[in-house]
Amino acid sequence: MGHRTLAACRGGCIRVALVLGLAGLGGIAVGSGGKAEGDDLLFMSNRSENRFEYYRMSADGRNVRRVLAERREVESMRWSPDGASVLYAAARPGEHQNLYLTSTLDGKTRQLTHDKMPCMDAVWAPDGKSIAFVSLRGGVRRIYLLDLVDGRERRLTQSERDDEFGPRFSPDGRSVAYLAATDKLAARVAVADVAAGKGGLVSQVTERSIETQPAWSPDGTRLLFSTKKGEGSQLVLMQADGSARKALTTTEARNSQAQWSPDGSQILFLSVPGNSARQSLFLMNADGTGVRKLHGGSNDVMDAAWSSDGRSVYFVEHLPTGGQVFGLDLSGGEPRRLSGGEGFDVNVQVCCSKPPARLLSSR
C-alpha cells in the first residue's frame, strides 16, 4: 500500500503504521470540499467484507464506486495518464505478486509480468506508453522498463551492485529518478537516462542518513525528498544533477511525503514536530519560506494530495473510528469530511481529470 503498512484486525480493530512516506459499497457524502472541475479521488478502503480494495469518488464525496469488478486486494494502483486504464500489483492464489493492467472501459485485464518473485511500485511514463517497475528477480530489487505497445522489457540501468527501488519518471519522460543502496551505503537519490540506460547516484552525501523517494518539480529541473538522520527527517531540494542541494526544514521534526503544487510554487508535506506525537499537514513556499500548518492536532494526518488546479488539498485523517477522507479549500474555510465512515480509508490520490465514460463497477 505504497509507503505505509496497514494491518486489519479481523475482530474490528485496525492498526496503521506509517513508514516514511502513498469502503461498504456506495458511499455517503458527508460534506463537499473545494474541488477542481473534473477531478476524482482514488483511495483504498476496507468498507466491503474487511477487504482492502480501491475505490473512486467525486471530489465532493459523492458517487463512490469500486474500481475493479474482480474482488481482490491490490496494491499501488495508479490511473493511466488518459484515464482509460489502471495499473496495479496483485497476487493471485498460489502465485507471487505481479503487475496487471485493467481497462476501465470494457473491464479487460492484461497480466503484464509473470515473475516468480514479487513485482511492485509500477509507475506510468507521462505518455502512457510504458511503465517502470521494481522486481525482486535474482533476490535484489531492480528497476525495469516495459513498453506497453510492443511488450519489450529491459532493465533501467546495468548496475550490478545497487539495490534499486522507488522509480519516478521526469515530466518529459526522458529520465527516471529512483533510490539506490548498497551494503555500505543506505538509500540515496539516483537518476537514470531512459534512452541511454545509464544511471547513478546524484546525491553525494556520505553521512549516515537515509534518503526517501524523490519527487520531480513540474518543470523537471529539481528533485524534492526527505532525508532521515537519527530521530528527525528533513526536506531537501536539489537540482536533478545533485547540485545546489538545500535543506528546506531545519527543525527536530519528522518531515515526509513532500509534494509539489501543480505550478511548482508550493510544497505540501506531513510533519511530526519534535514536541508532538501526532502527524499534521503543512504547506510552505518552494524555497522553504512561509511554513504554515493546514490541519492536525488531536489525530494523525496520514496522506495528502493536491487538487489538479492547486486550489484545494485532500487528506486522510485517522479518526478514532478509522481513516476518513477530507477536503480543504486553501482560500479559507474548515476541512470538509468526504467519506462517511463506512470503513477505514487510506492512500488518497487525485486521479482522472479526464475520466473515462464509465467505471467497471457501480457498486
Image (spheres, rainbow, N blue to C red):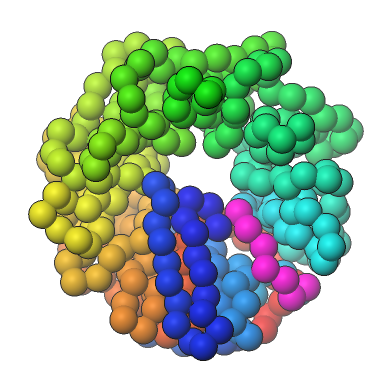
Name the residue located 25 percent from the left edge and 70 percent from the top edge. Answer: 299
Residue occupying the far front of the picture: 183
Residue 346 visible, this orientation: yes
Name the residue located 21 percent from the left edge and 31 percent from the top edge. Answer: 248
**Horizontal relation, residue 254 to residue 55: left or right:** left
Residue 130 visible, this orientation: no
Q: Where is residue 322? Give x, y as percent.
A: 39, 78
Q: Where is residue 35? Give x, y as percent.
A: 39, 64
Answer with the quarter of the image where residue 242 lies: top left
Seen from the viewer's position, the closer of residues 64 and 240 is 240
Seen from the viewer's position, the closer of residues 338 and 164 is 164
Seen from the viewer's position, the closer of residues 359 and 321 is 321
For the record, the magenta segment spans 70-76
Q: Where is residue 196? Give x, y as percent.
A: 69, 11
Above-or-below relation of 48 to 73: below
Q: Is residue 133 shown in magenta?
A: no
Q: Quadrant of the N terminus?
A: bottom right
